[in-house]
Image (spheres, helix red, strand yellow):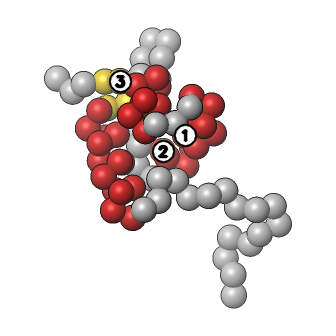
Amino acid sequence: MEQLIGEKEVCLRLGISHRTFLRYRPRMIARGLRQIRGDRRILYRSSDLDRFINRASETGILVAPPKKEGELSCQK
């Protein structure tokens, strides 16, 4: 059985605050962190988090920084 962890454990393993996690969560999900919705909680697979951390350590990027207001997503 896969080990499921909550947001608090994710924050501890990443070394970030809960508020920072909530702000970065959409970008983290876009980069491969998957959510599992429980009855009242959102859970994450421990193996998915490990894979996310390994990929981030290889690229040096935990999450992409937000785009500045007015910045184009595709520059010519």
Q: Earlier in the sequence, mark 3 or mark 1?
A: 3
What's the residue type where badge 3 is placed?
A: Ile
Q: In percent of the image, x 36 and y 57: which residue is there?
A: 57
State left or right for residue 14 relative to residue 19: left
Q: Earlier in the sequence, mark 2 or mark 3?
A: 3
Give the alpha-carbon distance from disc 2 to disc 1, as whole Å.
Answer: 6 Å
Query: Based on the displayed image, in which of its 4 quarters is residue 3 positioned?
Result: top left
Residue 6 vertical placement versus 61 (above, below): above
Front residue of 68 and 74: 68
Residue 68 appears in view: yes
Give the alpha-carbon distance from disc 3 to disc 1, as whole Å.
Answer: 15 Å
The quadrant of the image that shows the C terminus is bottom right
Residue 61 vertical placement versus 3 (above, below): below
Instruction: Specify the farthest residue to the top.
Output: 39
- Secondary element under disc 3, as helix, strand or loop, is strand
Can you tell which mark lies on residue 17?
none
How crowded pointer 2 is (Cα within 10 Å; few <14, some 14-19, many 20+) is rated as few
> x and y percent of residue 72 in the render?
74, 72
How crowded pointer 3 is (Cα within 10 Å; few <14, some 14-19, many 20+) is rated as some
> x and y percent of residue 1 in the render?
17, 23
Can you tell which mark lies on residue 5?
3
What's the residue type where badge 2 is placed?
A: Ile
Q: In percent of the image, x 48 and y 17: which residue is there?
A: 41
CB under 8 Å between discs 2 and 1: yes
What's the residue type where badge 1 is placed?
A: Arg
Can you tell which mark lies on residue 25?
1
CB under 8 Å between discs 2 and 3: no
